[in-house]
Image (cartoon, helix red, strand yellow):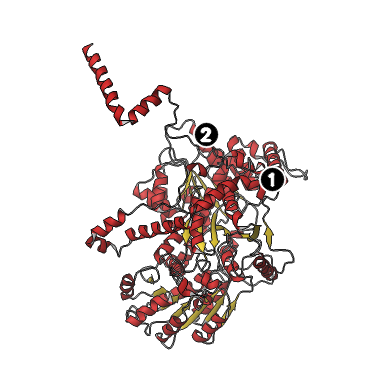
Amino acid sequence: MKLLLFKTQTRVFTFCFVKKKLAKKIMENPKIEGDKEKKDILGFHQMDLDDRILKGIAKLGWIEPTVIQEKAIPLLLEGKDVLVRARTGSGKTAAFAIPTIQKILNSKSNASEQAIAALILGPSKELCHQIRQVIEHLTVNCGRVVKCVDLASNEVTTQKHLLSERPDIVVSTPAKILHHLRAGNIELGDNFSTLIIDEADLMFSFGFEAELKEVLNFLPSIYQAILASATLSEDVLTLKSLVLHNPVTLKLTEPDLAKKIMENPKIEGDEDKKDILGFHQMDLDDRILKGIAKLGWIEPTVIQEKAIPLLLEGKDVLVRARTGSGKTAAFAIPTIQKILNSKSNASEQAIAALILGPSKELCHQIRQVIEHLTVNCGRVVKCVDLASNEVTTQKHLLSERPDIVVSTPAKILHHLRAGNVELGDNFSTLIIDEADLMFSFGFEAELKEVLNFLPSIYQAILASATLSEDVLTLKSLVLHNPVTLKLTEPDVAPTSHLSHYHISAEENDKAAILYALFKLHLIRGKSVIFVNTVDRCYKLKLFLEQFNIKSCVLNSELPGQIRCRVVNQFNMGIYDIILASDELALEQPVKDKSSRKRKADKESGVSRGIDFQRVSNVINYDFPLDVNSYIHRAGRTARGNNKGSVLSFVNLKERPLMDEVDEHLKAEFDMEENVLRKYQFKLEEVEPFRYRAMDAYKAVTSIAIKESRLKEIKAEIFNCNKLKSFFDNNPHDLQLLRHDKPLHTVKVQPHLSDVPDYIIPNSLKGVSNVATKPKKVPGGVRKSKKQKIFEKKKANPLLCAEIDYAKKQKVKIKKNK
């Protein structure tokens, strides 16, 4: 998913023309030209596929099948069991998805009821999500007929609801589907016809052997089975004997790349490069390795490969690497390993590691990573997050003496002073994450005082995205003869993974352009929109709400638990848009602190540290105030090996800031041309959107923003556990609060959620599919003149008695007759 770029009207027409030519080529597809010696390739049109599938293939731009697709699809359409072995990127997913969809379409005419026909199992959530996307693209013209759900990417309650609708195809990990099979939420009956196991070579290594065998017991006696794998390992052969009956084995004579990744001897294509040290070569506990496998990490990142062995040796380390490079796991894995090693000799349960983060959101994220890594040893290694809990809960958690404590400096210092926590001889590790933000978040005094409570000997780790003066100060305070690991890479993801665009837009145009981009589907996927103030966050939220564009708000003035909940809701996919306000105090000094009405939580950070998952786009609605802020905002997308885009709205005042950022990025990537490219967008083409947007934007007044925030506060008051006992003792106060005057924020008009065809630019008609039919008015049947007169009389209380009397008279006459 990425930000789409439509350069000019002419190019869009060219795009449509090429697309039609592409579809025509797929339908004709006689043979590959330019090589007389090559045999005729069996085209998609020769495979007896439904026209709706062919149209989906054409939309994807596939002219001809890959080798594996050409061989596998006909065999699968015949109903044979098949073992497909081909390297990653050879088109295995489509090879089993296309015949599965075709068979479901064929069976629809004879089906007596809706039922699950196919089950696709993958070893990871990411793979399941990817498979569902491929199926959605292929069924774009028959999506109402063929339904597909992905259990791996949803919560249990959502999964149950999705399964109750009996979709045709279920994509899941073995553990998720087994849970529902055991609970009786799903039944694979006589209509079930196909079992597909993708990346079969990873199933056992990801720890799914037991679950997979149990799932097979729930399947009917007769079904078609397909195994897709990049290698033919022993695990695959075991699965083959369990699942397949008289199978056809398709094996491409191509390099066994997946096996090379798992064994990981060296990086191919460069003889000078050294062997990569794999996780299995780091002497890690099997329970940690299983946790890593469940997370889908095949090999360590560069910083993990270098840091983990050094930390296991007990050395003090300063880790400097950009956001998304895997710093959290780099210090979490060796910390867990050391605790597991010490358990055999430990005489009593005690705190062994303290991890400090500058914000509550970051602490919450660190705890989640540790929980995933210790999923197979959670009873042995206990981790608590003080930052996300209330003081009373924190005290109870600390009384159990967990192995790892994650906290902000202020929270842990409170308990150290109160004597609720003691860091004795068993304490071995101090970790400070996002060290470059510790002093700027105002934690200098607290941090120095925390160090006084630590024992004389311990291992220390600093993890940071930059090597600022604050980090060097901390280094001298905390580290002893440290090893400094500094990755020779740019601060942001490379341009091959991260695209940078800008739109010249004055203040009055920004809202209209944003509205048009979303409604014309030019922005797709999950987006983080940054603004510079909290009030603008709410103003933008209320503005988008009027067009039925749902979003959530994240800022430093929200309580910590709510901030963590908002991040989780965004990561779970409940919201696709999050509106975040940067901490202005970090970017621009506030001259008069006393003039600030609302108190911001200093333990909050938005543009740094937080792992917003699967973000496709970062939109700078307000341009950041310096280069570092731009880099940290851009770091929310294109994390790891994923791709993303940054789109910045720039007005005349912000132009010098943009030039400064562009110069920095050019120097970073050693490029002569501009890194921030102009996003080709004709303002005159969205003129019809402007009128709607201006009215909606004006409707969001300062009073509306204030009342929106009051509404949010009231909702939190009712949900607050602390106040429950107070309201139990003072029910009158609760009644007054509930019967307080209703808050009027902004009136949402239903017709604004639709985009009439006449306001869509001609260049995008037929491309973005955004035109919506006007909704029928409830009770929209046309009424006769007599019916309207009768309804008016019925609505008039003075005439109601006359109508009732007339009815009674009619009843009497009928009875007399």
Q: Is residue 308 above or below residue 193?
A: below
State the residue in front, 458 or 110. 458
Whether residue 533 is visible to the viewer of this picture, yes or no, is yes
* Left or right of 38 in this view: 506: left
Identity, as a three-letter code, of the amino acid under mark 2: Asn
Name which of mark 2 and mark 1 comes first in the sequence: 1
Q: Is residue 134 above or below residue 457?
A: above
The quadrant in which the C terminus is found is top left
Residue 487 location (% of width, % of height):
61, 74
Look at 58% across and 46% down and name the residue there: 691
State the residue in front, 55 or 744. 744
**Local crowd size for mark 2, using a 10 Å CA cut-off: few (<14), some (14–19), many (≥20):** few
Element type at mark 2: helix
Element type at mark 1: helix
Identity, as a three-letter code, of the amino acid under mark 1: Val
Q: Is residue 788 above or below residue 816?
A: below
Residue 108 location (% of width, % of height):
49, 33
**Which corner quadrant of the image does residue 589 belong to?**
bottom right
The answer to whether mark 2 and mark 1 are in CB contact below 8 A is: no
| Of the two numbered discs 2 and 1 in the rendering, the one whose residue sits closer to the viewer | 1
* Left or right of 40 in this view: 452: left
**Local crowd size for mark 1, using a 10 Å CA cut-off: few (<14), some (14–19), many (≥20):** some
Look at 65% across and 65% down and name the residue there: 658
Whether residue 357 is visible to the viewer of this picture, yes or no, is no
Q: Which residue is mark 1?
A: 12
Residue 68 location (% of width, % of height):
62, 47
Q: Which residue is mark 2?
A: 106
**Which corner quadrant of the image does residue 378 belong to?**
bottom left
Q: CA distance from mark 2 to mark 1?
A: 36 Å
Looking at the image, the residue that sits furthest to the top is 817
Looking at the image, the residue that sits furthest to the bottom is 456
